[in-house]
Amino acid sequence: MPKIVDKKSRRSEIAKIAMELSAQKGFDKTSIREITTHAGMGKGSFYDYFTDKEDLLEEIVQVLFEEWTRLIISKLENIDDPMEQLATLLREGSVMGDEFAQLMILYVDTWRRCVRDKSSDKFTQYFKSFLIDSKAAVAAIFENAKAQNQIREDVDSEVLATILIALIDGLILHYMVLKPDIDIDGVSQSFFKMLQDGMK
């Protein structure tokens, strides 16, 4: 009896392998043959799961953002205090473990493709949705802090959420280029203290 393969699960598995390879040298320079070799399949079998490399990229983006969301949620799920959630988000969002560093490399590659290449509306939509959802989640934390009288009522939650997310992206990019000459933890803590003081 032939082995039954869960196509959705296998697509995700191949995408994760492609993510690892792409994090080392970029998506454009990673060949389908390299991906299929590491996935233990023939090159022709690739087309049983993906129509082309662009289709694979769309799956990578989905997996990337799911993984990123999973990592952040796992750090925040046991914290009730909104200010502590924000501090944790900034601190953990700026920490570069191996898994997070790999995701960040792909995130930058994804960002570059999204800005440069508008050929895939689906791909661009995944990216926009991730940014919009991230901003909404952080804005909700600011709103919760307002409701608990931890920050001023006139604080614009959406603006601050956008700034915080952009700051995390920027800090990580600086760290990836300047390490070990930048104290990313010290910078993020100093910024959060200034942010807290400005919101009271």
Image: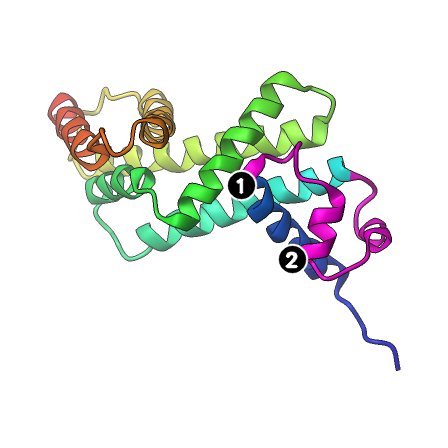
Tally the numbered discs: 2
Q: Is residue 153 left or right of residue 47?
A: left
Q: Secondary structure at mark 2?
A: helix
Query: Front-most of 39 and 185?
Result: 39
- Work out which residue is located at the far bottom of the displayed protein and give it: 1
Residues at circles 2 and 1 in contact by the CB criterion of under 8 Å = no
Q: Is residue 14 left or right of residue 133?
A: right
Q: Which residue is found at the position 45% from the left and 52% from the top?
A: 70
| 160 versus 88 height, above or below | above
For mark 2, does the 10 Å Cα neighbourhood hold few (<14), some (14 to 19), or many (20 or more) residues? Answer: some
Q: Amino acid at mark 1?
A: Gln
- Asked if residue 32 is among those painted magenta in the image, a careful observer would answer yes
Type of amino acid under label 2: Glu
Report the residue marked by disc 2: 13
**2 shown above or below 21:** below
Q: Residue at x 59, y 45 (%)?
A: 21
Q: Split into 4 quadrants, where in the image is the C terminus?
A: top left
Residue 25 image point, x, y percent: 57, 36
- Secondary structure under the numbered disc 1 in the rendered image: helix
Return the residue at label 1: 24
The percent coordinates of residue 66 (x first, y second) are: 53, 48
Magenta-drawn segment: 24-52
